[in-house]
Image: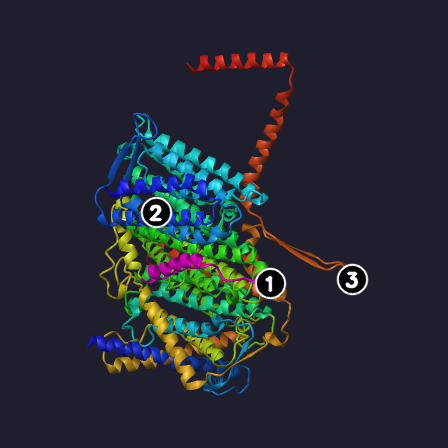
Amino acid sequence: MTALEAGLLLAAGLLALGPAGALVAQRTGGAAIVSGASAALATAFVAVGLWALLAAGPPVRTVLPLGLPWIGAHFRLDALSGFFLVVLGLGGAAASLYGIGYMRHAAAPGRVLPFYGPFLGAMALVLLADDAFTFLVSWESMSLLSWALVVSDHRDAEARRASYVYLLMAGLGTMALLFAFGLLAGAEGGYGFEAIAAAERGPEVTAAILFLMLLGAGSKAGVVPLHVWLPLAHPAAPSHVSALMSGVMTKVALYAFIRVVFDLLGPVAWWASPVVIILGAATAVMGILFAIVDGDAKRILAYSTIENVGVILVALGLALAFRANGMTALAALALTAALFHVLNHMLFKSLLFMAAGAVLSATGRRALDALGGLIHRMPVTAVLTLVGVTAIAALPPLNGFASEWLLFQGILQSPGLPQPALQLLLPATGGLLALSAALAAVCFVRFYGVAFLGRPRSDVAAGAVEADRWSLAAMAVLAALCVLAGILPGAAVDLIAPAVGQAAGGRVPPQLGNPWLTLVPVAEVQSSYSGFLVLVFTTASAMTAAWLVHRLASRRLRRGPAWDCGFPLADPATQYGAGSFAQPIRRALGGTLLAARERVEMPPPGDLRPARHAASTEDLAWTWLYLPVAAGVGALAARLNGLQFLTIRRYLSLVFVSLILLLVGLAVWN
Amino acid sequence: MELIQGLLVQGVQMLLVLVLAPGLVGLVRKVKARLTRRRGASLLQPYRDILRLMRKEVVLAENASWLFRVAPYAIFAATWVAAALVPSFATGLQFSWTADLIAIVALLGSARFFLALAGMDVGTAFGGIGASREVMIGAFAEPAMLLTVFTLALVAGSTQLSVVAAFMASPEVGLRVSLGLALVALVIVAIAENARIPVDNPATHLELTMVHEAMVLEYSGRHLAMIEIAAALKLLLYVALVGCVFLPWGMAAPGSGLAAHLVGLAAFLAKLAGGAVLLAVFETAIAKMRVFRVPDFLGAALMLGLLGTLLLFVSRSL
């Protein structure tokens, strides 16, 4: 049995978990069995993906007699899909492990279990598809199954609204993909990926396909301004499904972009890359700004996903720019940074969504302003979450920094590009990326500081209990992988190399032979970074300092009331909360970008009403793009509504006139 | 032999920055006092303060968590490692390839991250106000810093500080407008990062405008001592950084003899003293600005950094 057949069998197994889940959902322990089975199948996907990466042979293909008769469904396993299968397998296994514990206290497991396994299976089929038809069917199944998971809590009006917006945006995205594949197939209509890759097309068609892919894959990945559904839908799902949607499904969308633009499309003109880079930079900065001003723990994580997708998109745009100029090694460097960040973001975002889910199960609250002091009540979750926030804030020696560092190295190579437009654009993009990384640190100091540190702001937070063992195990695995990928970035880069080689046609130098696990992307005289040594040095100096101080100076300690400049206030509401912590950034950057407004209602002297202060922000994409479109559609529908109440005579003349018009149109057309 | 020398230089560097850092703070305070016609405390006062704090009992707030107790050591370690990787008196640091300038800046970012978290831990209004403002300053300072790094990397072809310093000392650099802009941007970032006037006032207490001091308000005893050392190390790091990139003269090249290293040491001490005097004069001459003016101040650094980079593209000779 080849690895591809194994992968297809595993996907079939995951699809079969759907009916099985529907059957056993009501039994006690049924959810645990189904989640355990999907964890095992997802782990096997990691093995399949690793095999495809390490074997690095030519792509394996097969045709199954499914779908359209006489055509069948084509599947293929190569290094690129192998890498994304590893991402899918790791994320799916961790989420399923978490689900064993989490589903135990789910209100209605029957609304989650039948869709959970097939959702994973559909994502795997997207990665394995080798013709446009199979790809689109798998893609649409993935969208619909995740929609069903979003709406699983259907009593919540917010979840219903989220699922509605999601369905509309998913439809728009699939339509864009449909047109993109139509153009890819061309007039001859070869829908197999091999035929598409072999076909020749003009620069206008190439550009049109690229923009359709940005629309189709970008709407699924959350590129600004197509992001509006994401912060609604991702948080509405059960927490381990949120982890999958943010950690894995956005990556499947990026896979679609990479597969089409880097692998199938052929050469892309350089002027397409600034569009991708600008979109990516805008997505990164806007995503993290939204995250900073939001007060809902899971929505903050969803907005931060948008930021990370933006970072990856910048790296992809950079790779396109280098490739268009024939600088293969540098294109490989940028693409390595992109794929490494894909892996890293899956790890820490899944971890953080699971942590938010643990907090949600323990307190029943998602609003940061209802939490606080959880480091005392949920000590293990707090440690694991700390690893996650440090990683996502791009701080050394964890993995988020390693991939952003690689991307900065790629940007530093941009002076070699011949086009002045790119030369001027990329330093500014580097500044914006640094801004979004620094804002991510702001966002996650706020996230962790308000939820886990300080004093509890509600009774439920004060009475929270630690998460169950399964959930903790899943989070611990992800946290350990975050640390490993941070201190062994060379191993990750070498592992990614075959996938990069396939898409970019080159590779960065092998890293594992470097002394002290150092990462040397171009040459040591230019730049190098060793996460391992940074970890060893900081840990050693911290331990030595602590030991010396305790040994030689003093180890006495006394507990007392907080000092707070002499006026400690007992009310936990006097702590800094989510809104107050965001205030400096909201004032400094939110004025135009978020339309942030602050209103103070000060009653006149003598009036007994309290003074009030209200701060508001809005998403300008809603205000300027979606609401006008929605209003236009609504007005048109209201106008057409009149057609329902005509007399039979008018209907007959309407039919007659439209018939005439159609005939005239036909006559003119021919 | 070369390895032994490299390790020796690295070891001396680690101890040197640690020993000199409080002295630098003392010198700045002394000069500031003399400028305002006060006599001022002895140069050794910061050392005495730190030793006194070390021996004192820690008074910990009742609901402080383990993070509050671990953070001072983590902050100290991250800052110390960063400071040990900036060439001060010799360019041949054994471990300079561990982290390039971007990673050094990010290590300082880690220190800030944990300091801000520690500020949030006790759950007081002052801790939160300090943390939220500190991270805002960081959010503007880091991109400005990165654009400066970008300019340097374009000129020197590397982000490795030892290589940059060696290149800057070579005659092929010449006078460039871009480097001047980068210097101004770097100085603005250094002032903001070290909580100096006009961004923050290191001498303040019990003021609503304080940032750094508000964050560390709950710390006492040895914990406060570690944070004070870390703050002093950070100041020294930035002075050493400006020195090694823009005034690289006198630094001992790798493999040179003892005399060259002693010259390097003397030059480093002179650079530190010069930096301290200039900082003190600047701080005395200027008034502190409102917190919400800080983004404009740092935005200027950001624009200067970007301008420096763009100038390099427009004309290779500027």
Nearest the camera: A26 or A334? A26
Q: Give me the C-alpha separation between circle 1 and circle 3.
A: 32 Å
Q: Secondary structure at mark 1?
A: loop
Q: Name the residue at 26% across, 33% down.
A: A198
Q: Secondary structure at mark 2?
A: helix
Earlier sequence position, callout 1 versus callout 2? 2
**What count of labels does the image hold?**
3
Taking the magenta stretch, the answer to whether it contains residue A575 is no
Tell whether A547 sits left or right of A453.
Answer: left
Q: Which mark is residue A457?
A: 1
Rendered-image quadrant of the C terminus of chain A:
top left
Q: Which residues are magenta?
A: A458-487
Taking the magenta stretch, the answer to whether it contains residue A463 is yes
Foreground disc of the pair 2, 3 = 2
Q: Amino acid at mark 1?
A: Arg
Task: Give the x, y percent position of residue A121.
Answer: 37, 41
Q: Name the residue at 28% across, 77% down.
A: B9
Q: Are marks 2 and 3 on the same chain?
A: yes
Q: Which mark is residue A41?
A: 2
Q: Name the residue at 23% across, 80% down.
A: B257
Foreground disc of the pair 1, 3 = 1
Position of B74 relative to A54 (above/below): below
Q: Give me the C-alpha separation between circle 2 and circle 3.
A: 69 Å
Q: Amino acid at mark 2?
A: Leu
- Tell which residue pokes out farthest to the left in this image: B1
Position of B209 relative to A473 (above/below): below
Earlier sequence position, callout 2 versus callout 3? 2
Rendered-image quadrant of the N terminus of chain A:
top left
Q: Which mark is residue A605?
A: 3
The answer to which image quadrant residue A371 occupies is bottom right
Nearest the camera: B19 or B69? B69
